[in-house]
Amino acid sequence: MANKAPGTNPVKKVPIHLKSSQNRILIKGGRVVNHDNIFDADVYIEDGVITQVGKDLTIPGGTRTIDARGKLVIPGGVDANTHLQMPSMGTRSVDDFYQGTKAALAGGTTTIIDMALPQKGESLLEAFEKWKQWAEDKACCDYALHVAVTWWGQQVAAEMDELVAKHGVNSFTMYMAYKDLLQLQDPEMIQVFKMCRNIGALALVHAENGDLIAENVKKLLQAGVTGPEGHALSRPEELEAEAVNRAATIANQVNCPLYVLNVMSKSAADVIVEKKKHGAVLFGEPIAASLATDGTHYWNKCWRHAAGHVTSPPLSQDPTTPGYLMDLLGSGSLDLASSANTTFTEGQKAAGKDDFTKIPHGLNGVEDRMSVVWERGVSAGKMDPCRFVAVTSANAAKIFNLYPQKGCIAVGSDADVVVWNPNRTRQINAKTHQQAADFNVFEGMICHGVPEYVVAGGRVVLDEGELRVSQGAGRFIATPPYSPHIYLRVHEREKVRFPRKVDRDAYEPGAPPVSSIKSVMEPAPFVASVTSNNGATSPSSNGHHHHHHHANGNGSVVGEVTSGVNGLSLTNGGGGSRKVSGEYKSPPGSANSAQGDGFHLRGATAAGSINMQDSTFSVSGAQIDDDTPRRSTIKVHNPPGGKSSGGFW
């Protein structure tokens, strides 16, 4: 059992039907903010669901009214990346499902998605059931679960399928680090990505190069580097970027949607942005810590302070990184902000006092995430309130197929609502936060934007700053497969990218080579014969309907050109005539060939009209005056634009 701060004994769960004032809640006079609009409205909640949104609502008696004038009414936060009571390095993260979800509610987060983490060789189903039981007994808010894939085999494939089909899981995490413990190799990742694609799930990656990290660790320890700075030195920024690029490339090749956890550096973020530009179905998730602090703390003279920041991937040593990542988050290049909350006490971290590889990885954020994003995003002018809602709730709900049940203020949505005061401030302090950890990476930070009321599942759990939670009140929320916000794109990409073979003649030894390759969209060749007045006939054929003409008896061609559908007649002024005859052939299998070969290459429209833009005219190839002798110079008396009065012409 994790340590608890004084005065945080669990409140006994009270049946909701015994709380009449909790059943019906009216949030009145506020400004509703969703990810796509802002409007003034009242919000009425009954039996855990939003039932009315608007003005002049009809409200039954016995309803509690919350005054939201001058405040924002936003969806409860969705934190898509937490690690509560997670076993690690012989210990367990100190925020369990009670303490962690209590802290989440204090900060305005009403739904978390935690990570079930089986060891190599362990059943995925057993790990899922274990984590779900832990949460069911303690969680104060709603929760869902990712499941990590730490090994590969037929059993894993079958269990992934069952988790999606029967247990409400639609996301699987792969670790590219923690060699010999959790790390998957590329061939295994390929198989997991393919399986995710086949069952409509989302692949998540912890992106680092575990093999190079292992090599770096050996060198650092041999050099006598044992402090927390060794953690950062063993994991340089380029290792994160390389892993993101590798994972995104593999996912793109098998057409699997990909979600990158814990984006910590500029380089990794840039890879995500570049891949998105080329059409990858890819999502990037910075965390509260990477948006508000940096890795210079690893060189702090205080070992406790430096170790308190150890997480993986490490915080960037570049102090401008948080602002850079927030710019990308605000502009839409990165998608959402989570916490990756994995907290340990000073005593637990001290296991690595003589060897940085033994310091448990993780830091806080589940309580402070929303205030930090508001302070560094909205208050800094890098995003508007709608974007704030998108990155703290709506986008996570969409990606994991919980929208509009979660992440939205609308009729029929779950009654997870926050009354947010954008003008109030608070200072973050480890002594006053709700988490069980005794260290806070945001220590001393003053945040504008504070939740004053939090409604979770139709219950007021934060009431003017007073926290009233019930252990075990949270529900498991199934995440269905094939999220339309992801898989509509995946399916269309699959259609467009479906490989098609080239139909060609069988190979014959000694056959002349084909000089060029013509597109099926290129107009078909015009095959013609030219007959002069002396009876001689010469064939003409090329891909642009050009004709080789011969001069008449006096060596020149003048006269009248008469065109028809299947032929072209040339008549000269001296009575002689030539006829260019031939036929246009439509490419096999084209729309034209279905209507018969003819002059109009595109065929008739559905209404029977022909394309008036079709023409046999071309300025390339053989021309009618090819036989006319060329003059070396031509004097122009009236050039285009007017007659010149100077001597230039």
Image (cartoon, grey):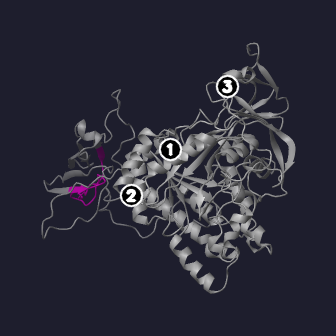
Say whether residue 150 is left or right of residue 239: left
Q: Secondary structure at mark 2?
A: helix
Q: Is residue 339 magenta?
A: no
Query: In the image, residue 397 lies at what x, y percent?
Result: 59, 40
Query: What residue does disc 3 label?
Result: 16
Q: Is residue 551 magenta?
A: yes
**Marking on residue 191:** 2
Q: Nearer the viewer, residue 378 or 285?
A: 285
Q: As shown in the figure, which amino acid type bears the numbered disc 3? A: Ile
Q: As shown in the figure, which amino acid type bears the numbered disc 1? A: Ile
Q: Nearer the viewer, residue 329 or 220?
A: 220
- Asked if the residue under mark 3 is in contact with the one under mark 1, i.e. CB atoms within 8 Å, the reply is no
Spatial CA span between label 3 and label 2: 46 Å
Residue drawn 54% across the image and 44% down it: 132
Query: In the image, residue 593 lies at what x, y percent?
Result: 24, 40
Q: Secondary structure at mark 1?
A: helix
Q: Nearer the observer, disc 1 or disc 3?
A: 3
Could you tell me if residue 171 is visible in this image?
no
Query: In the image, residue 238 lies at what x, y percent?
Result: 59, 71
Q: Which SS type dominates the magenta stretch?
A: loop
In the image, the segment drawn in magenta is 540-561
Residue drawn 33% across the image and 47% down it: 616
Label 3 environment density (alpha carbons within 10 Å; few <14, some 14–19, many ≥20)? some
Q: Secondary structure at mark 3?
A: helix
